[in-house]
Image (cartoon, rainbow, N blue to C red):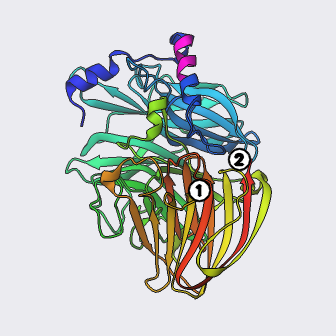
Amino acid sequence: MLTKIDREKEFKRMVPHIADVDPQIVQAEKRLAQTSPFRQHFHIEPASGTLGDPNGFSFFAGQYHLFYQWSPLAFHQPALWQHGWYHLASPDLVHWQDLGPGMESDTSYDCHGTYSGSALPVGDRLFLMYTGNTWNRNWVRVPYQIGAWMNANNQVKKNAVPYLTGSPAGYTPHFRDPKLWHHDHHYYALLGAQRENLTGTALLYQSTDLTAWRLLGEVQTDTPDFGFMWECPDYFEVDGHGVLLFCPQGLSADGNFFNNVYQNGCFVGEPLNYATRGFHHGAFQELDAGFDFYATQTMQAPDGRRILSGWMGISEIHYPTEQYHYSGCLVIPRELSVHHNQLVQQPIRELTSLRRERQTVNQIGPGTVALPYTGQVSQEFDLTVSLAATQTVTLDFRADVLNQHHTRLTLDRGRQLCTLDRSQAGLSFAEQWGTVRHRRTPLGERVRVHVFVDTSSIEIFIGDGATVFTSRIFPAANQTQTFVTSSDGQAQVTGSIWNLA
């Protein structure tokens, strides 16, 4: 936790608008970031500085809108603290238009940070609600829950007065990240909170006019004591199930689970009882088994699909791109559904529009075989791996020609276990949190492995998407190969590999 002296230093050079900064400084930061060998090809990432939580994910005025937490000068020396929401729009969730700063920290209620929030279309405008972060003279945090409206021309106007000041009685100033929805003639906002006994929870508010908000109380889960803070809460219903998606901080590692700094997952259960706030559910499901996945937010597409975005990063991790004065990207959008009481993820179907040159895969054999190389590292692999004549198969992505450096996925049918190993992936970082992740997964004779590889990331979807690994990787430029190895029998791999535009 930062001390008072740290806070004074952090906010001494706070600027309300990026336009207040010398344009030469802004452009120099962007130019440095563009020299990075790790710039992503088809993922959203910042032109400079830090990208964080996705915010305001919505469909409005015929387009998808997505904002993200943004500090474009975070790595400039001396640091210039400018914080806000950056705005993108898209017709298809794949090709994004850069709309520039969406909101900045330019009022007394958000002067120390325009923190996370969400959006809801209301008539011909988009309603935004977010947390404004401030610190008083004694360096005690004071959160505000603030509203804003965006018109069809993408112009945002903040409300002059916050809806909520401070935190409710019985809760600490860790009170943030409102998620909006509409149900049965009422508007609802779910906020992450920390009780005074330093345990996490989610508070439910209700409004009839988006102006006066009434605290209904905590969502009554079956697991009331779970971590010290719940960030980025999100409630929705899909396939007849209620889903409470959130980021519990403070969970201790438990075998193959909770091995990251902070976790992201959900409870799946019966739909929320709005009268009692009761939510009956199963065990907590860690949503991603990889290294870099946090701060998810969902929205409902016009066709009814529930779509997820998330930050491919975690607070307190330092990534190799920081030497080029930028950090962070977003995951590819994912469609959510519930199978056998488990929330599963699949890449959105619109991503097929990125496909270009295709290679067909039909490899059989024991030992190690190379898959066809498509000519670039930004690729999609849609493979079926046969485990009928072998117990263990490894797939090495972004490998060098000798396969000494790679990102390794192992499918172990005997132990019903999937393993992601990035210990030899390239530049090392965050090794104090481990370099290997395991997840128990039902593995039959045939397993679908759907993989998206970009310049510095990998996203792996196993089977129906119940097991997903998301990770940043930083390979060398010569790591362009893909290998399949079966050491105890004969493996067959079929499918397709595409270059992605």
**Range of residues picked out in magenta:** 24-29
- Nearer to us in this view, 198 or 475: 475
Q: Residues within 10 Å of mark 1 (few under 14, many from 20)?
A: few
- Visible residue check, residue 184: yes
Secondary structure of the residue carrying tag 1 is loop
The image position of residue 366, as x and y in percent, is 59, 82
Q: Which residue is mark 1?
A: 184
The image position of residue 57, as x and y in percent, is 60, 44
Q: Residue, x 51% and y 67% (percent of image)?
A: 409
The image position of residue 140, as x and y in percent, is 24, 29
Q: Indicate whether residue 27 is drawn in magenta.
A: yes
Report how many numbered discs are placed on residues in the image.
2
Q: Main secondary structure of the magenta part?
A: helix
Q: Indicate whether residue 333 is drawn in magenta.
A: no
Q: Against 192, is 32 above or below? A: above
Q: Specify which label sits upstream in the sequence, 2 or 1.
A: 2
